[in-house]
Image (cartoon, rainbow, N blue to C red):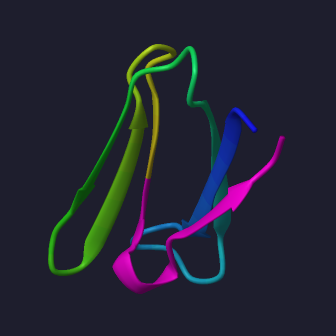
Amino acid sequence: MTKLSYSGLKYGEADVQIKIMVDIQNDWCEITHTNQVSQVMNKTTGEYIQVNRNTLKCEIVS
């Protein structure tokens, strides 16, 4: 149980689903929220997603 998948509807876009994977044992991640936006950053890989706040989901992948 080391990988998490974060997903949601892309901020500013209609019906565009985006995802990011985070290995919680090896990656450094940061999750921040504002009134409208949630941002998940995988600081190890430099990837990030910005989604509408109420659409952010987290799933255990493995």
Q: Quadrant of residue 22?
A: top right
- Who is closer to the viewer here, 56 or 4? 4
x and y percentages locating residue 34 in the rendered image: 16, 69
Q: Residue at x 70, y 32 (%)?
A: 2
* Position of residue 60 measured from the top left corner of the image (x, y, whole percent): 73, 53
From the viewer's perspective, tell me whether residue 43 is left or right of residue 25: left
How far across and down, in percent of the image, does residue 37 sit? 28, 70
Extreme residue in the front direction: 1
Residue 1, relative to residue 27: is it above or below? below
Going by the picture, which residue comes out furthest to the left?
Answer: 35
Residue 52's x, y, as percent?
40, 76
Numbered range of the magenta stretch = 50-62
62 to the left or right of 47: right
Does the magenta segment cover residue 23? Answer: no
Tell me if residue 16 comes above or below residue 49 in the rendering.
Answer: below
In this view, 33 is above or below 40: below
The quadrant of the picture occupied by the C terminus is top right
Q: Determine whether 44 is above or below 15 in the image.
A: above
Q: Quadrant of residue 14?
A: bottom right
Q: Which quadrant, please, contains the N terminus?
A: top right
The residue that appears at 65% across and 82% down in the rendered structure is: 15
Which residue does the image show at 38% across and 21% down from the upper left? 43
